Image (cartoon, coloured by chain):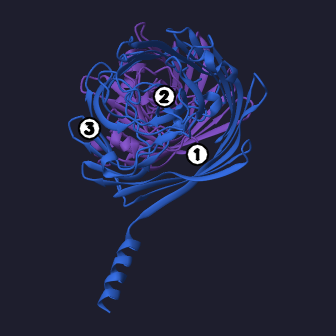
Amino acid sequence: MKKIIILALVLISFSQAQVSFDLGGELKSDFGVFFDDGLFSTASTQLDLKLGGEVGSGFFPDATFNAVVRGKYDAITNTTMFSVREAYATAYLGNFDLSVGNQKVFWGSVDGFNPVDQINPRDLSNPFVDPEEQKTPIPMLRVVYNSSFDLKLDAIVVPVYVASTLPGARWQPAPAAMTLPPGVQIVGKNPIINNQPEAKLGNIQYGIRASYNLDLLEGADVSASYFHGIRTTPTASAKLIPTANRGQFKVQPILNYDIYDLVGLDFSVALPATVIRGEFAYTITGDPDGTIPTIQNHSFAAVLGSEYTFAGDIMTVGQIMFNYTAADKGKDASTRISSLLTASYNIDNYFNVKAVWIQNFSDSSGALRPSVSYKFADGVSASADVVFLYGSDSSQFGSLSKNSSLNLSFDYSF
Amino acid sequence: MFKKIISLLLITAIGFGFAQKYETGLEVMQAFDAKEQPKSTIATTKMLITSGSGQSLSREMQMWSSGDSQIIKFLAPADIKGSGFLSITQDDGSSEAMIYLPALDRIRRISSDKKDGSFFGSDFSYEDIDFAANDINDSNYKILDFSDGVYQIKAVPHDDSDSLYDKRVLYINEEKLIPEKIEYYIDGELAKLMTIVETKEVSGYTIFTSLKMETLDSESFTTIEQSDIELDKDIPAEVFSERFLRK
């Protein structure tokens, strides 16, 4: 009897809590066709149902919750997929925000390429989908401390490793040719060994970021971050496995997921007519000498950019990116310099034109993506874009030039 | 003779009864500027943007403002719901601005030099929205007319002003000291017309609850309606923060 009374009291107290929620969603259809052979790159319809709400009242409720469930039908593969995207709750505890569940985190300051932002895996099945579409929510514990003196600390723990979805076969670069010793003959290939990390304590990922707002010019902020993680894309390597016949070997492909430590710095500074942003990330791996082929070498990435709105409301973003990867033993280090330029113009409240241009100066290849979008009514829009890839067959983008495509998208948010 | 004196006195008395209270445009604007403004405002704002072809887009937002700091969170339509805008004025008078993009869970610092920009795609510019907060010493004022208790005042910005407009004509009600209509001129031509459609007394203040701004060359117009208005509420400083923007 006592237990029943206690249970009733608990239920009554929950019913007294002020809970508000709303349900919405997004219906999206995407179609794409490769110019080279007329094959469809994309033909899918996707429905996201979104539930969000608050518990408690006042300026800061006791807690908020968010959930997104996705159903997607892919007509090319004739498959239907259901997944839980975001599903997390945030409790507001004084100066602390505690979030638990499937969530996306953004660390960084620049647009497009974020060397500091490596926490969430990505769906890379189509590498030219917008970055926000690529990020995959994963289970994590996140604690944000908001101090009263412009300092914010953001700590995350990712208990279970989730890999990125790799690009489809058509988007994968051609494997590098193996240098075979004399007298060695390749007679076959073994199934891939995929060393994806297990869900265990030793594979927990974690990180912390400190951000500080500066009373400088029209506002500035600087952040330092540290992340101990496991690469969401594998390092591919291969070794030769001898067969029963002398001189004959089979290739054994291996996918390894490196453990690394990332130290990052990013900032943004607002000036009267522009905003300057930068990100720098140094990645330390388990192969400082460049002798272990299954582990990537130390690397450094930097992005510096600015945003400016020209007369007539043409908003532009320009960035320079620098990537450095330490050398394998006996070889040269690799560097890459590239740029990103975007221009966006709202002709009116309904019609927007945009262009994105990425240029790799190191191999003279690039990608150009002009697009137009039209808003039919509140929440209803359509867009069309062309992805044009160019460069030599051995270059970053030129090797994918047969994937230049036309893409259409229809979107209804409710 | 006596009759003439009485007539003259009566005419003078009647004339004083209908005489305008302020002699110069600057006096009117100073009286308008001296009106006590609420220290803080919380309101739900609905905005309907109608193009010249008759198409409409809506925006519904929750706004909090205190002093020169303001935070706006979009409630509708669904494709922008959850987005937010934060503007904080520092002690030295400089302002910083940030937007929140929920799809990216990202707070993005932006340039606050948007005075000439459109207020969220509407026919209002940021300068128009903040007209009550604009420094009256930025312009010269002249009374063009006074009739039916309304001053017609020409306001011409000083040469060093960064105003969008080369002239404004304000129609200010003498008794309430609020504008009923404002004409905006660019290159000498009437470019935009703002009409205060409805006002309401809230906590002793006269609040514009319905505004309309028309852009004449495109024949587009935007209406703004405010509801659920709370004034002089004690809004904690932490509301004007990235944390609240992201919530």
Residue A94: x %, y % from top left: 24, 52
Gap in angstroms between the C-alphas marked 2 and 3: 72 Å
Could you tell me which quadrant the N terminus of chain A lies in?
Answer: bottom left
Using the image, determine if residue B68 lies above or below residue B231: above
Q: Are marks 2 and 1 on the same chain?
A: yes
> Which element carries disc 3, helix, strand or loop?
strand
Using the image, determine if residue B65 lies above or below residue B130: below
> Which element carries disc 1, helix, strand or loop?
loop
Label 2 with label 3: CB-CB less than 8 Å:
no
- Judge depth for marks 2 and 3 and give the one in front: 3
Chain A drawn colour: blue
Q: Chain of mark 1?
A: B
- Residue at image position (40%, 23%) is B112
Quarter of the image where one finds residue A162: top left
> Which element carries disc 2, helix, strand or loop?
helix
Residue B142: x %, y % from top left: 46, 16
Using the image, determine if residue A348 lies above or below residue B54: above
- The residue at which mark 2 appears reads as B11
Q: Residue furthest right?
A: A38
Q: Chain of mark 2?
A: B
Q: Nearer the viewer, residue A185 or B66?
A: A185
Label 2 with label 1: CB-CB less than 8 Å:
no
Quarter of the image where one finds residue B29: top left
Amino acid type at image mark 2: Ile
Residue B232 in view, yes or no: no
Chain B drawn colour: purple
Q: Chain of mark 3?
A: A
- The residue at which mark 1 appears reads as B78
- The residue at which mark 3 appears reads as A152
Amino acid type at image mark 1: Ala
